[in-house]
Image (spheres, rainbow, N blue to C red):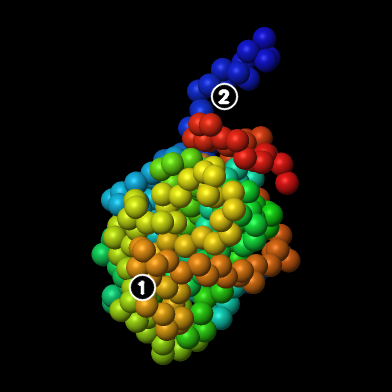
Amino acid sequence: MLVQLIALAFAALPQVLAHGGVLSISIGNTWYNGWSPYNSPTGQTTIIRPWSTYNPITDATDPTISCNDDGSSGALQLTAPVTAGEKITAYWNQIWPHPYGPMLVYMAQCPGTTCTGVNSDTLSWFKIDESGLINGTVYDGFWGDGLMIADNSSWTTTIPSTVPNGPYLIRFETIALHSLPAQFYPECAQLMVTGGGSLAPTAAELVKFPGAYSNTDPGLDVDIYSNTAQTETTYPIPGPPLYGSGGVASSPSGPSSTSIIPTTTVSTTPPSSTPTGPTVPEYGQCGGTGFSGSTVW
Ligand SMILES: [Cu+2]
């Protein structure tokens, strides 16, 4: 009977169990509980922008791809103070199940004095961090996503010391390539940056969401189980060149193959409350029909 009840419970929540998103954020020693997509939005106060589903976005031009929602702020939206040069960590809702694909972090400055009330679709984003194929092959190498999983399903990045002061959205994104179309998992939070610099992003570094990605980008329509993938050791990370790189946008036919390993650190200050939520078996896969890759490290 118990087994049957458990089976029923799992059958009722297959989508929820399979995926997820950013449930909390820490900046320095400050812990911020995030948005709870399966609770009522009424009364939720958090620095994370509202988002509505654990399901992945599977179209690179989907209207919800900026912040996994309609782009609006919450009714009781908060903003976290951050000093340029400070580290910020995003925590996913579970042991993340998708080790194959890139990690990306973007920022976008809001007009005026606050991001509250500003639709994220209207902003111009620049990429401050990326990690693609770190080593090995596209088929079974070690990816940014694997590094995120290895770091307690969290991702730490540094607010560039050179960004101008002001209100920003930060957008943490993990892209899963275990099945096609690629799966996008973006979530955003509101920041107020102080102590910054004066290096504005270049035109080539600025993109819109939707707009930054195309479904035919070489880093998004890659079949990691193909024969060529088994010997391919470079991977073109989607999106614009990194902020401050002085680079120009790569053309689809001539992608760059840079793979920058970020300086991730395991948080030395454990959160006072750990994220709770649905769990899946370690490295359990979802959406991966025909999945044939490694299931253990
Ligand atoms: Cu998933």
Of 120 and 99, which appears nearest the observer?
A: 99
Please give the residue where the numbered disc 2 appears in the rendered image. 10
Q: Residues within 10 Å of mark 2 (few under 14, many from 20)?
A: some
Please give the residue where the numbered disc 1 appears in the rendered image. 249
Q: Is residue 10 above or below residue 88?
A: above
Residue drawn at (52%, 43%), measured in percent from left and top? 226
Q: Residues within 10 Å of mark 1 (few under 14, many from 20)?
A: some
Q: Residue furthest top?
A: 1
- Label 1 is placed on what type of residue? Ala
Of 294 and 169, which appears nearest the observer?
A: 294
Q: Is residue 247 visible to the viewer in this orientation of the structure?
A: yes
Residue drawn at (56%, 74%), measured in percent from left and top? 158
Mark 1 and mark 2: Cα distance apart in space: 44 Å
Which secondary structure lies at badge 1? Answer: loop
Relative to residue 88, is residue 197 drawn left or right?
A: left
Residue 77, position as x, y percentages in the image? 39, 60
Identify the image quadrant of the N terminus.
top right
- Label 2 is placed on what type of residue? Phe
Q: Which mark is residue 105?
A: none
Residue drawn at (51%, 28%), measured in percent from left and top? 14
Ligand 1 closer than 8 Å to label 2 CB: no
Residue drawn at (35%, 58%), measured in percent from left and top? 213
Q: Are marks 1 and 2 in contact (CB under 8 Å)?
A: no
**Which label's residue is closer to the chain start, 1 or 2?**
2
Residue 188, position as x, y percentages in the image? 43, 59
